[in-house]
């Protein structure tokens, strides 16, 4: 029998796999659908799935859970909004690795939010990650672009989300938190569709596949796994597992899109991954 912590860690590894696969799928989907319309459909469908699965448990939502869920939902929306729009202007594999920087950002932000003293390994991890990011974006033909900047904002948003998930899921019911998060993200996406973009939806099998995979596996199931399982293991182990997301994304971006980072880009990605691992393993 697997222990509770082992089951949680395996579930989080599956989550990292789901998240990694979505990068090339969303990249393709954005050729047929505008970003915020895609987010509204993705999170609207995920919200419906969570409602159907947990309808009895979320029939009543208290004020504390509603407030926490909205905070998490706003952070989730900002993360996915910056990431999805950024994917229009950068490679899927690069987007995944820059998104992965949220693991590096968690320690310094934890100092401000939960007063956790940073350790030397966290600082070394930050330096490694910054060096890797420079290598990934500096080579000719792969300069730092607007998509990369938007994805950096995505990483910042997700770092706050990880911290507050750790805080709130230890106090409140995860089913209700997941539902409010997804509903909040859906509602925030709808006005952005009309204010910030020209609506576009072209029927295509690849678009439908991306919607189903991202809504069902990466969003409904994925956010539920994160909110349910992250509290059953340590934040350190969870963060280390999340570093597999850009690895999975790099593999599937190569298999699906044929994206190749090149020697220097691979070295940079390796430094970012090393920075993440150093930052988190140093807490042991």
Image (cartoon, rainbow, N blue to C red):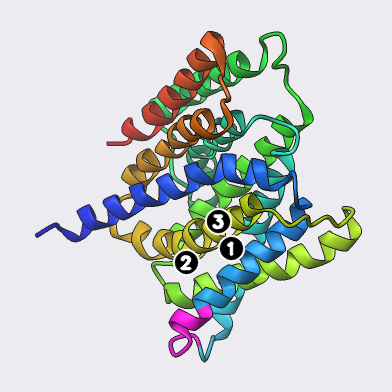
The correct choice, above or below, for 4 with respect to 251 in the image is below
Question: Which numbered disc flags the more N-terminal residue, 2 or 1?
Answer: 1
**Foreground label between 3 and 1:** 3
Q: How many marks?
A: 3
Looking at the rendered structure, the secondary structure element under dot 2 is helix
The correct choice, above or below, for 74 with respect to 85 in the image is below
Looking at the rendered structure, the secondary structure element under dot 3 is helix
Question: Which numbered disc flags the more N-terminal residue, 2 or 3?
Answer: 2
* Residue 192 in view of the camera: yes
Dot 1, how many residues are within 10 Å of its Cα: few (below 14), some (14-19), or many (20+)? many
Magenta extent:
51-58
Residue position marked by numbered label 1 in the rendering: 72
Instruction: Look at 43% across and 86% down and name the residue there.
Output: 57
Instruction: Look at 66% across and 70% down and name the residue there.
Output: 184
Residue position marked by numbered label 2 in the rendering: 168
Dot 3, how many residues are within 10 Å of its Cα: few (below 14), some (14-19), or many (20+)? many
Do labels 2 and 1 touch, CB within 8 Å?
yes
Quadrant (top left/top right/bottom left/bottom right) for the C terminus = top left
Residue position marked by numbered label 3 in the rendering: 214
Instruction: Look at 59% across and 21% down and name the residue there.
Output: 133
Q: CA distance from mark 2 to mark 3?
A: 24 Å
């Amino acid at each position: 029998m697997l222990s509770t912590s082992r089951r949680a860690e395996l579930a989080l590894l599956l989550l990292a796999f789901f998240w990694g696969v979505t990068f090339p799928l969303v990249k393709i989907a954005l050729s047929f659908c505008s970003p915020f319309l895609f987010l509204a459909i993705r999170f609207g469908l995920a919200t419906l799935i969570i409602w159907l699965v947990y309808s009895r448990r979320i029939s009543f939502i208290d004020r504390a859970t509603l407030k926490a869920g909205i905070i998490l939902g706003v952070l989730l929306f900002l993360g996915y909004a910056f990431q999805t729009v950024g994917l229009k202007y950068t490679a899927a594999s690069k987007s995944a690795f820059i998104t992965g920087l949220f693991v590096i950002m968690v320690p310094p932000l934890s100092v401000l939010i939960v007063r956790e003293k940073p350790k030397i390994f966290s600082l070394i991890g930050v330096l490694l990650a910054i060096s890797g990011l420079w290598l990934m974006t500096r080579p000719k033909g792969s300069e730092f672009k607007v998509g990369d900047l938007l994805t950096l904002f995505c990483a910042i948003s997700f770092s706050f989300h990880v911290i507050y998930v750790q805080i709130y899921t230890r106090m409140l019911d995860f089913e209700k938190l997941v539902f409010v998060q997804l509903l909040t993200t859906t509602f925030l996406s709808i006005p952005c569709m009309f204010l910030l973009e020209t609506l576009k939806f072209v029927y295509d099998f690849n678009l439908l596949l991306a919607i189903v995979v991202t809504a069902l596996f990466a969003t409904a199931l994925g956010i539920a796994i994160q909110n349910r399982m992250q509290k059953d293991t340590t934040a350190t182990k969870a963060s280390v597992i999340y570093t597999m997301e850009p690895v999975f994304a790099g593999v599937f971006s190569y298999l699906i899109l044929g994206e190749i980072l090149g020697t220097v880009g691979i070295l940079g990605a390796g430094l970012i991954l090393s920075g993440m691992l150093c930052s988190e393993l140093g807490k042991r």
